[in-house]
Image: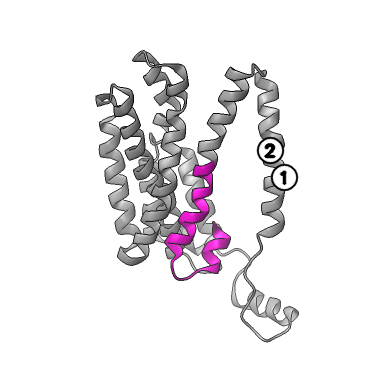
Amino acid sequence: MATVSRYFNKNKGLTVGIIIGGSSLGGVIWPIVLNELLNTHGVSFGWTIRAVGFIMIPLLILAVVTVVSPPETSHHSEQVIVQEIEEKRPKRDLSIAKDPTFIILCAGLAISILGMYSPMFYITTYSRSLGHPIDISFYLVSVINGSSLFGRILPGFLADRYGHFNLCTLAGLASGITSLCWTAAKSIPGLVVWCLAYGFTSGAILSLQASCAGSLATRETQGTAMGFLMGAVALT
């Protein structure tokens, strides 16, 4: 995310949303893979996790090999560019961590995400408690993540026009209201509609949090900003 933010000054919300949308695609696929291996084919839990790891390893290697920092826009040699950068900035630029706006952003998002993942873990259990079949209940997680894909891309596109912080605030409010309606859904159609709504609104938060942090950071502190933001969110 930090690398993408450095490449794009315009349409940053859209580009970050597309990148983060990849995790939503994984959120659709992995529950189906796990269900097929564990419940349909009777594969042990250990080998199921190993299979997931074997799939992820080449994908992660591809990302490590292909993701590079953007080139410097200068006609000087590479050695001169490195010297200029070292002279202009300190070894460790932590100025973003002292920005009051950034600190409030990290604190606010940490609180917002405090219970945001609860439906991911408990929607299947909740559906089963209502007496619905396990197969349908299990796929509700994929419904949330599938809707989250659109929630991460479309709000990012709108945020570039109407403001990243404005859209992030609206997404947080909409996600909170939707979560309060969770237990009102009892039937399978009702649960599917709720999952679609919650996936879209919660996905918008995950997309816009990165673009908000990126808009506050300089080109040199993008990585630091993402690190502090994700660290604050991880604590909750």
- Name the residue carrying label 1: 58
Q: Is residue 80 above or below residue 119?
A: below
Q: CA distance from mark 1 to mark 2?
A: 7 Å
Q: Main secondary structure of the magenta part?
A: helix
Residue type, label 1: Pro
Question: Which image quarter: residue 131?
Answer: top left
x, y percent for residue 61: 72, 49
**In terms of depth relative to the viewer, which is nearer, 49 or 33?**
33
| Left or right position of 68 against 113 | right
**In terms of depth relative to the viewer, which is nearer, 97 or 132?**
132
| Point 35% across, 31% down: residue | 192
x, y percent for residue 31: 53, 30
Q: Secondary structure at mark 2?
A: helix
Q: Secondary structure at mark 1?
A: helix
| Point 56% across, 24% down: residue | 35
x, y percent for residue 78: 73, 79
> For mark 1, does the 10 Å Cα neighbourhood hold few (<14), some (14 to 19), or many (20 or more) residues?
few
Asked if residue 28 can be seen in this view, the reply is yes
Question: Which image quarter: residue 87?
Answer: bottom right
Q: Is residue 201 above or below residue 227?
A: above
- Name the residue carrying label 2: 55
Asked if residue 107 can be seen in this view, the reply is no
Residue type, label 2: Ile
**In terms of depth relative to the viewer, which is nearer, 97 or 236?**
236
